[in-house]
Amino acid sequence: MQYTKLFALAAVFVSSTLAAPLDAEARACASTCGSVCYTSSAVSAARNAGYNLYSAGSTENSYPHVYHNYEGFDFPVSGTYYEFPILSSGKVYSGGSPGADRVVFNNNDQLAGVITHTGASGNNFVACT
């Protein structure tokens, strides 16, 4: 009887230990804007939605639109750049208030970065970490 309990406890420990890295990875921040953590899947979903609208020649409440990079960010991809809202709710932007955060992508559907109005002066942006 004791061996059965010990085996059951060991099985629970092993399964929870093996699952922990996957859970941590699912919650990992690919980008943090202010105090908002965005997973890589949230960043990809926002970029995909923005690029799909761009490539269809369409917009949602004027997004995506050209991002002029007045702040002089050193993006890892070349542009013309476009900005599209990324929402802290986890939903993909479909109109209404865009919030403070944006994904920036180019006309080749490459992610340039994630930026935010949070912590910036005026209507400027700062980089998310």
Image (cartoon, rainbow, N blue to C red):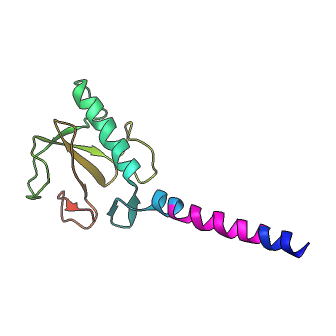
Magenta-drawn stretch contains 19 = yes
Toward the viewer: 37 or 44?
44
Is 3 situated above or below 76?
below
Q: Quadrant of the C terminus?
A: bottom left
Toward the viewer: 74 or 123?
74
Is 127 situated above or below 67?
below
Residue 56: x and y in percent read 25, 24
Residue beneath the point at 9% across and 46% down: 78
Residue beneath the point at 10% across and 58% down: 74
- Considering the whole magenta stretch, tell me its main secondary structure: helix
Relative to residue 13, is residue 8 drawn left or right?
right
Residue closest to the far right: 1
Residue 71: x and y in percent read 10, 59
Toward the viewer: 1 or 34?
1
Is 34 situated above or below 123?
below
- Residue 128's quadrant in the figure? bottom left
Residue beneath the point at 37% across and 52% down: 40
- Residue 93's quadrant in the figure? top left
Residue 121: x and y in percent read 18, 65
Query: Magenta residues, as a range?
Result: 8-21
Residue beneath the point at 58% across and 61% down: 19
Residue closest to the far top: 56
Q: Quadrant of the N terminus?
A: bottom right
Residue 111: x and y in percent read 23, 47
Question: Residue 71: in sight, yes or no?
Answer: yes
Is 93 situated above or below 90?
above
Question: Residue 59: in sight, yes or no?
Answer: no
Relative to residue 2, is residue 123 drawn left or right?
left
Relative to residue 99, is residue 66 drawn left or right?
left
Toward the viewer: 8 or 55?
8
Count of all numbered marks drawn on residues in the image? 0
